[in-house]
Image (cartoon, rainbow, N blue to C red):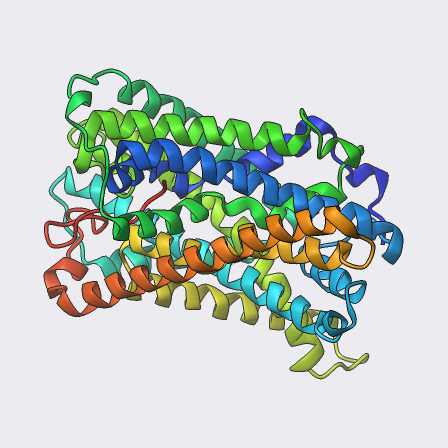
Amino acid sequence: MKSSSKDRTNFGQSLMHLIKCNLGTGLLAMPAAFANCGLIYAFIGLPVLAIIATYCVHLLIKSAQYLESKIDSDNIEYAELAKSSFKVGPSWMRRCSGFMCKMVDATLIISQMGICCVYLVFIVDNVSKVLSTYNIHLPQMVLFGAALPVTLLLSYIRTLKKLSIASACANVLQVIGILIILEFLVRDLNHAHKRDHTQPLDKVALGFGSAMFAFEGISVVMPVYTRMKQPDRMRGLFGAINLSYFILFCLYFSMGAFGYLRFGNDAQGSITLNLPANSDFYNVVRIMFTMSILLTYPLQFYVPNEIIWNWAKENLIEHDEKSPPKKMVYYEYYCRTILVLITFILAVSVPELELLMGLVGSISGTMLSIILPPIIHLAAYWENTTGQAKLFMCIIDFSLIIAGVVAASTGSFVSLDKIVHTFFESTPHHHQTVGSSTMTTSAMPASTSTF
């Protein structure tokens, strides 16, 4: 099904979509990432990761362009792309095409629901930081409870057109906040020479997971591509992919480097928590980011809700042509309510922002950004590639797959191990009193962030 011309986006709009969908809590965790990895690992690791992520997006779009003529569609999504690539692959792959479609949908659900959980913890941590400056100390559950009705109301917005208003407001708040924070970070770098050059490898593994979380916009790459007026401008040296990921890399590197050079190992899971505590001005900045993330929640929530709701309509709800249309709307609201409550339960269960980002990034972020693109590329081109070209394709793609699996397994294991230890070793005060941030405590040093 082709998108109508009025729904198409120009090059500039597509570029901004790719950038803004990757700018979230991961950007604010970059200083803690540098602290966890050390200057050498961070300065080497982040550029390498950015190059790999960019290359994998190219593989995804290249496969989509190759398959469009075979499936006669210009509106192919991520899951459909995986299914179509396996359908044209070798015979043993064709039998797995349906499974691949379901697996990609499941991974997208895990990724986006995980992002929603991280957003909730971010909101609670930053609100608690602001309240603590005025000697207001509330139980964590009270803050989660206060956020629930607002989040539910936002999740009841059912169309992307209406969500675009919330997205525009979030973008304005975020841009202003980023500029203020960068200005604050470069103001005082007197202790830069005292920063660590390396860190233990277990911290690097945790950092990798959060690094993949930072590149959280992989799920929107295909929708952006299919809605471009000039889809051929997606790739190329100065295409939307290269430009957007170069800009993202510059922002991530600047925030991480300046934040670590300014605060060293004291950099917290969100740099907003390192801003001056008793300043009304910087409390306003925290509130700006909190509002921005809150308004972005329904956008991240949209993808998993669409997948689960469409499945529920086909498999769980009896269709009756005589039943009023409002009945289906009510069912959809029930579905949205249940999914929002699930994200709150998960966020309350794992209230450590850095560990949660590391786990989500290791499991779903690595799968969507590094492992699946080369698998899809191999399946799509396997039958029509021969000789040295096929050998070169296999070497590159299998190397990415193996590296992704190893990194995802290691990062997930370390993140889960830290979460389990945090859960069982935490005192009731650590999890219930939020007069100070729950991101980093004396019992749990900041260890999970981006390269």
Q: Residue furthest front?
A: 387
The quadrant the N terminus occupies is bottom right
Q: Position of residue 16 (x, y in %)?
A: 60, 31
- Closer to the camera, 413 or 81? 413
| Vertical arrangement, residue 201 with respect to residue 415, above or below | above
Residue at x 19%, y 26% (from the top left corner): 279
**Which quarter of the picture shows residue 10?**
top right
| Vertical arrangement, residue 223 with respect to residue 318, above or below | above
**Which quarter of the picture shows residue 415?**
bottom left
| Vertical arrangement, residue 398 with respect to residue 307, above or below | above
Number of labels in the image equals 0
Q: Is residue 423 left or right of residue 89?
A: left
- Closer to the camera, 162 or 174? 174
Q: Position of residue 90 (x, y in %)?
A: 77, 67
Q: Does any portion of residue 185 appear in the rendered image?
A: yes
Q: Position of residue 309 (x, y in %)?
A: 63, 69
Residue at x 35%, y 31% (from the top left corner): 43
The quadrant the C terminus occupies is top left
Q: Position of residue 343 (x, y in %)?
A: 42, 63
